[in-house]
Image (spheres, coloured by chain):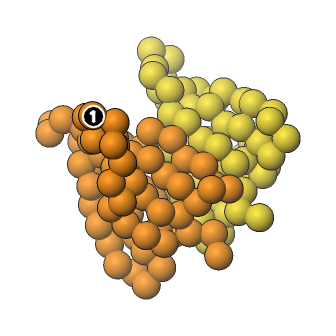
Chain colours: A yellow, B orange
């Protein structure tokens, strides 16, 4: 099972879990990213990928300014 | 083992394997992305993430223009 948990890094450096068991990640235009979970649940976040550690099942995202 | 293979999509839509068993992916400034393999091998590509399918262990990247 290789899904990852997605965290959003806030301005003060804290990390907040936004979605668990994400299997598909697609960066969209305008600084958004679409996340799709194991059961087809979808979430679009106004954030870009900052770093991904696939062995730790961890994806850190950073909020983007609205474009 | 949750590393992924990274493919670069060419202009005519073909996909070329650029690195196997990637464990860390970090988008850099200027449209580049750093890939780190299971044994610490590093590769920086002039490309951005197009889509990632963690269940299929597949990351597709698209070349960016030099900035």
Residue at the spot 43% in from the left edge and 74% down from the top edge:
B37
Residue at the spot 63% in from the left edge and 69% down from the top edge:
B2
Quarter the N terminus of chain B occupies: bottom right
Vertical placement of residue A51 versus B12, above or below: below
Residue at the spot 33% in from the left edge and 54% down from the top edge:
B16
Vertical placement of residue B57 versus A17, above or below: below
Residue at the spot 45% in from the left edge and 22% down from the top edge:
A29
Q: Nearer the viewer, residue A4 or B63?
A: B63
Quarter the C terminus of chain B occupies: top left
Vertical placement of residue A50 versus A36, above or below: below
Q: Nearer the viewer, residue A46 or A65?
A: A46
Q: Nearer the viewer, residue A7 or B10?
A: B10
Give how far across and how far down residue B7 sits, in percent: 39, 54
Q: Is residue A61 left or right of residue B10?
A: right
- Residue with the mark numbered 1: B12
Give how far across and how far down residue A57 sits, in percent: 67, 63
Q: Nearer the viewer, residue B22 or B31?
A: B22
């Amino acid at each position: 099972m290789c899904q990852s948990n997605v965290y959003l890094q806030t301005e003060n450096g804290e990390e907040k879990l936004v979605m668990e068991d994400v299997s598909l990640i697609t960066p969209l235009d305008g600084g958004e990213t679409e996340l799709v979970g194991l059961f087809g649940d979808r979430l679009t976040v106004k954030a870009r990928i900052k770093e991904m550690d696939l062995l730790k099942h961890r994806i850190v995202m950073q909020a983007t300014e609205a474009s």
